[in-house]
Image: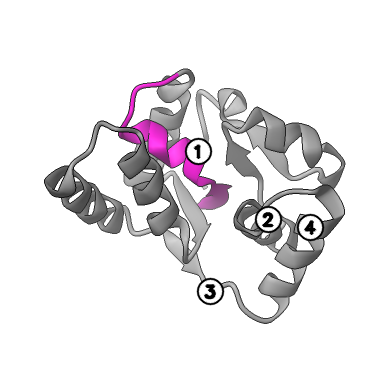
Amino acid sequence: MSAIVSDASVIVKWFVEEKHSEQALRLRDDQVEQRIRIVVPSLAGYEVLNALRYSGSFGVEELVEASGILEGYQFLEVSMSGRGAEEALRIALDYGVTVYDAAYLSIGKLRGLEVYTADEELLRKVKKLGVARHVKEYPRVRSRR
């Protein structure tokens, strides 16, 4: 099974219909059907829940439900310490992005994985890093490995 990194901007689209939600949901379905494995930093769930909270569409009960759903996806969570944290800090400083965004990019860079995001400003800033892709580029058909 192949692996990819998905940032919070993509995962939020699983709960809130937005531009490129269709591609984000395809990525989710590939995780559920075990065609891919989604790798995230350990903070990803909190980042998604925070975005949902501030979307204005989720109360306490809906956020608790979303939290349970996120747990059910069984992402491969990476602790951001040691080499991963160091690389995230370097990326954040070198490319002028948040440490949170750099955490996803660090995982992609260190593990040789594509990082999918819906954040166009982030993509513009880290283009030279070479690991980030827009979720709209997510393959329509993935082969099972």
> Going from the N terminus, do you reach mark 3 or mark 2 first?
3
Query: How far separated are the C-alphas under marks 3 and 2?
Result: 13 Å
> Going from the N terminus, do you reach mark 3 or mark 4 first?
3
Query: How far separated are the C-alphas under marks 3 and 1?
Result: 19 Å
Q: Amino acid at mark 3?
A: Ser
Residue 82 falls left or right of residue 46: right
Q: Give above or below for 56 relative to 129.
A: above
Question: Residue 9 got which mark?
Answer: 1
Q: Which residues are magenta?
A: 1-18
The reply to whether discs 3 and 2 touch (Cβ–Cβ < 8 Å) is: no
Q: Quadrant of residue 104?
A: bottom right
> Going from the N terminus, do you reach mark 2 or mark 4 first?
4
- The spot of residue 31 in percent (x, y) is 39, 45
Q: Give above or below for 56 relative to 104.
A: above
- Say few, some or many: other residues with alpha carbon within 10 Å of mark 4 (under 14 / 14 to 19 / 20 or more): many
Residue drawn at x 23%, y 50% is 69
- The spot of residue 99 in percent (x, y) is 66, 59
> Which residue is labeled 4 in the image?
91
Q: Quadrant of residue 29?
A: top left
Q: Amino acid at mark 1?
A: Ser
Classify mark 3: helix, strand or loop: loop
Classify mark 1: helix, strand or loop: helix
- The spot of residue 45 in percent (x, y) is 39, 56
> Which residue is labeled 3 in the image?
79
Query: How far separated are the C-alphas under marks 1 and 4?
Result: 18 Å
The reply to whether discs 3 and 4 touch (Cβ–Cβ < 8 Å) is: no
> Which residue is labeled 2 in the image?
102
Q: Nearer the viewer, mark 3 or mark 4?
A: 4
> Going from the N terminus, do you reach mark 1 or mark 4 first?
1
